Image (cartoon, rainbow, N blue to C red):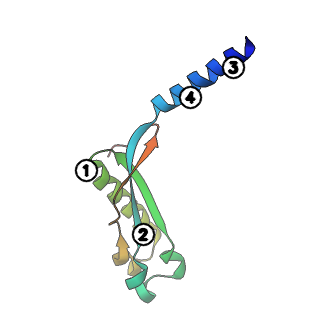
Amino acid sequence: MKLSIVAGFLLLTTALTEVQAVQCYEGTATINQATSGANCTDQEKGYYNSSAGPLTHQGCTDAKADARAKLTARIQESCRPYVQSFQPCQAIPLSACPTY
């Protein structure tokens, strides 16, 4: 009896967790290592940022823009022209998608 109650609770917990997760887009921004040369430090060349948005074209665009803004704030001015966010967005599960 106890085993069936525990199994039922685990099944219910798993189902609730899956229901709470929604699909969002994750956009990323990186430094173009091939063309940045001496304009970026080696440390900056390893930086990236990501952000999430609703699972729409605009949500992807906004997530990439937010990731780009966060990355730009972390690097010196001479490195900023080499920030890129060309990679396609990936769908990821989150509890809620941010809105902008």
- Name the residue at the left extreme: 58
The amino acid on which the numbered mark 3 sits, given as a three-letter code, is: Val
Find numbered disc 2 in the image and state the secondary structure of the residue it sits on: strand
On screen, residue 68 versus residue 56, left or right, reads: right
Q: Is residue 97 visible?
A: no
Q: Quadrant of the N terminus?
A: top right
Label 1 packing within 10 angstroms: few (<14), some (14-19), many (20+): few
If you read the primary sequence from the N terminus, does the residue marked by circle 1 or circle 2 appear first? 2
On screen, residue 59 versus residue 20, left or right, reads: left
> Residue at label 1?
57
Q: Which mark, residue 6?
A: 3
CA–CA distance between discs 4 and 3? 12 Å
CA–CA distance between discs 1 and 4? 30 Å
Find numbered disc 4 in the image and state the secondary structure of the residue it sits on: helix
Label 2 packing within 10 angstroms: few (<14), some (14-19), many (20+): many
| x, y percent for residue 95 | 46, 37
> Residue at label 4?
14
> Residue at label 2?
30
Label 4 packing within 10 angstroms: few (<14), some (14-19), many (20+): few
- Please say if the residues under marks 2 and 3 sit with CB atoms less than 8 Å apart: no
Q: Is residue 77 visible?
A: yes
- Please say if the residues under marks 4 and 3 sit with CB atoms less than 8 Å apart: no
Q: Nearer the viewer, mark 1 or mark 4?
A: 4
If you read the primary sequence from the N terminus, does the residue marked by circle 2 or circle 3 appear first? 3
Identify the residue at image location x=39%, y=41%. Answer: 23
If you read the primary sequence from the N terminus, does the residue marked by circle 4 or circle 3 appear first? 3
Identify the residue at image location x=58%, y=25%. Answer: 13
